[in-house]
Amino acid sequence: MIVQDVIDMVKLGFLTNLNVGSKDDTLIKFVHLGVSELYRRFNLSIKVETVLTNPMLSLYELRSPDISLILSIYDSRGRELRQTDVLSGQHDYKIMNFRSFLLERPKDETLFAVYKASSPSLTQSTDVIDLPDSMMDALLCYVAYLGHSTINKDNLNEANMFFQRFELRCQDLDNQGYRIPLNTETIGVRLKGYK
């Protein structure tokens, strides 16, 4: 689906009585904000970056421009390195910010940093939206919420109604399993009901 498809659907069913319906540039920005919100709430893009390390350097920064959050780091054997643990004090690395980490004992090796990627930039009506079909209704509600809250300031009740519908759609997506825990330790047998 492309941005123009979403704009057409929003104009048809959600923003028919508002002046914003004729402003495609504004609607493209609203669609971008909606897609960004869904990427923020759900893990829609998980990527990996290769990091070459050496013993003389402890601080490393990932270079990809779409990094939202470092999730975990693996060595070349596929072993997940231990992140800072307040209780035990034993760790292999410490996350410094959303794109950099500090190795405890660096050496010559190849590491793989797994990170949550931000949403792609949507600036044209022909840009492709990479979302599951089941998230389209949530996106439409979010775009309608933005349209009603920024353009129709006299009737904020409608904006609130669309935001509540967006929240309900997100809860439905949660129940369908779209929200995956970011910490791999929480995806264990205990979470699935086994002890």
Image (cartoon, helix red, strand yellow):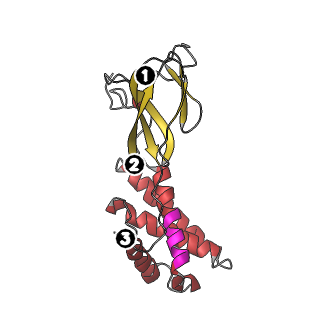
Q: Is residue 158 visible?
A: no
Label 2 neighbourhood size at 10 Å, few (<14), some (14-19), many (20+)? some
Image location (x, y in percent) of residue 5: 38, 75
Residue denoted by label 2: 45
Residue denoted by label 3: 2
Label 3 neighbourhood size at 10 Å, few (<14), some (14-19), many (20+)? some
Rendering quarter of residue 172? bottom left
8 over 181 or under it: above or below: below
Q: Main secondary structure of the magenta part?
A: helix
Image location (x, y in percent) of residue 174: 41, 49
* Sequence-earlier tag: 3 or 2: 3
Residue denoted by label 1: 81
Quadrant of the image for the C terminus? Answer: top left
Question: Label 3 to label 2, Cα distance in Å?
Answer: 18 Å
Three-letter amino acid code at the position of disc 1: Leu
* Sequence-earlier tag: 1 or 3: 3
Q: Magenta residues, as a range?
A: 25-33
Residue depicted at x 50% and y 15%: 105
Rendering quarter of residue 186? top left
